[in-house]
Image (cartoon, helix red, strand yellow):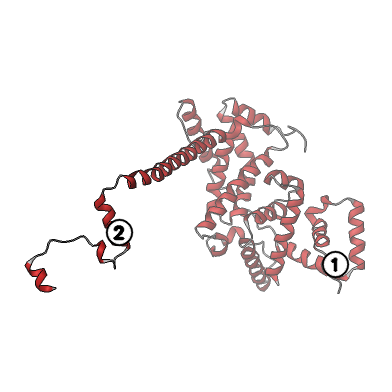
């Protein structure tokens, strides 16, 4: 990972120096990515919007004690993943799992792209995706985070390890266990 | 069919499209050669690849209109509060929050410790100073069948008649 290679760190330095409006540049640059990550971790578009907003506020508060290292988005991903994992843990405490009970309300953004004009193929694709969603919802929070970062966000083991603060070996082990569960759910 | 070791299956993850960078070219070649030789490993690979494919990333929802404006409004609110010197618990650095939490826990533990010491220390002192009447009461409770422990009541005419 290149040290301080991201121009976003300069923007953060300005924010840390008191230039609040400089933060808008970061929000514009990363909002799509963070919203998508939060949505995929939480499985709910509405909750993801609130989460992403909180993540940006946390990033703003932490701007003062940032250490330029790697990419800004990795730093933002770390804040977002921790925030969403905490939210998932709290949600588990109150036995409220959106991934499982989200029916039609958030079906549209999470539906897979149409498999073609064949309605049967579309139906089959939706059925498969529902199964996958249910399997993801049953994964422990740590495994879900690794799976989302690897499969949906395309991060390498190294990047995931940096985001989650774990070793690359732990990343592989979590991903392996997550995939085992997904395979079992598809059988 | 030969059993596939967990470590070998975990290695297969590195053949997946977005994780190929985790393997060196030599490592990948070796793994593909093994796949051609070992049917059990090939079957595990097929299962894994199919599950990975089923996890097709769904299209992301578009950024809601006005999202960045709302974020910046809240950021400015916080910036203003900071500039005005307002103390916000959420804005406090982690070490400040951790110190406060530790002080609170220490206070509670200290209070609980002192309370417990005071309670156990009081028991023998109070027991020593109990009057004789209380002692006879405990004797009555502990040995209810012993008539000698029952304090003598002044006899009345009705009592005499009942006996």
Horizontal side of residue B35 vs B115, given as left or right:
right
Q: Is residue B145 above or below residue A20?
A: below
Q: Chain of mark 2?
A: B
Horizontal side of residue B66 vs A40, given as left or right:
left
Q: Residue at x 67, y 32 (%)?
A: A67
Q: Residue at x 62, y 27 (%)?
A: A14
List x then y, in percent, for residue A118.
68, 71
Horizontal side of residue A86 vs A154, given as left or right:
left
Can see residue B97? yes
Q: Which mark is residue A187?
A: none
List x then y, in percent, for residue A124.
66, 71
**Element marked by disc 1:** helix
Q: Chain of mark 1?
A: B
List x then y, in percent, for residue A89.
56, 53
Quadrant holding the C terminus of chain B:
bottom left
List x then y, in percent, for residue B79.
51, 30
- Where, by quadrant of the figure, is residue B84 drawn? top left
Q: Is residue B120 above or below residue B1?
A: above
- Which residue bears the numbered disc 2? B139
Can see residue A156? no
Number of on-image labels:
2
Q: Residue furthest front?
A: B148
**Element marked by disc 2:** helix
Q: Which badge, 1 or 2, is on the more N-terminal residue?
A: 1
Mark 2 neighbour class, 10 Å CA radius: few under 14, some 14 to 19, many 20 or more: some
- Where, by quadrant of the figure, is residue A40 drawn? bottom right
- Which residue bears the numbered disc 1? B41
């Amino acid at each position: 990972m290149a040290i301080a290679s991201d121009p976003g760190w300069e923007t953060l330095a300005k924010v840390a120096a008191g230039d609040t409006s400089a933060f808008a540049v970061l929000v514009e640059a990363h909002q799509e990515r963070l919203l998508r990550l939060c949505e995929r971790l939480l499985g709910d578009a509405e909750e993801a919007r609130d989460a992403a907003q909180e993540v940006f506020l946390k990033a703003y508060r932490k701007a003062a004690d940032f250490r330029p290292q790697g990419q800004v988005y990795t730093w933002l991903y770390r804040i977002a993943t921790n925030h969403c994992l905490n939210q998932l843990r709290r949600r588990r405490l109150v036995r409220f799992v959106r991934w499982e009970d989200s029916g039609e309300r958030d079906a549209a953004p999470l539906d897979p792209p149409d498999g073609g004009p064949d309605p049967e193929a579309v139906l089959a694709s939706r059925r498969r995706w529902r199964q996958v969603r249910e399997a993801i919802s049953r994964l422990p929070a740590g495994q879900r985070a690794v799976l989302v970062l690897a499969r949906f966000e395309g991060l390498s083991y190294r990047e995931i390890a940096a985001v989650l603060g774990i070793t690359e070996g732990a990343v592989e082990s979590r991903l392996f266990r997550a995939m085992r569960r997904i395979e079992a759910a598809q059988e | 069919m030969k059993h596939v070791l967990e470590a070998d299956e975990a290695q297969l993850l590195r053949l997946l499209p977005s994780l190929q960078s985790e393997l060196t070219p030599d490592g990948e070649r070796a793994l593909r050669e093994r796949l051609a030789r070992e049917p059990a490993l090939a079957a595990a690979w097929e299962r894994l690849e199919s599950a990975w494919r089923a996890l097709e990333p769904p299209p992301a929802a578009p950024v809601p209109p006005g999202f960045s404006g709302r974020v910046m409004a809240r950021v400015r609110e916080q910036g203003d509060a900071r500039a005005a010197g307002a103390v916000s618990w959420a804005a406090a650095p982690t070490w400040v929050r951790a110190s406060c939490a530790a002080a609170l826990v220490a206070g509670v533990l200290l209070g609980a410790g002192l309370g417990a010491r005071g309670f156990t220390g009081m028991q023998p002192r109070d027991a020593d100073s109990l009057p004789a009447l209380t002692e006879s009461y405990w004797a009555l409770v502990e040995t209810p069948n012993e008539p000698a422990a029952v304090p003598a009541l002044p006899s009345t005419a009705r009592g005499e008649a009942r006996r």
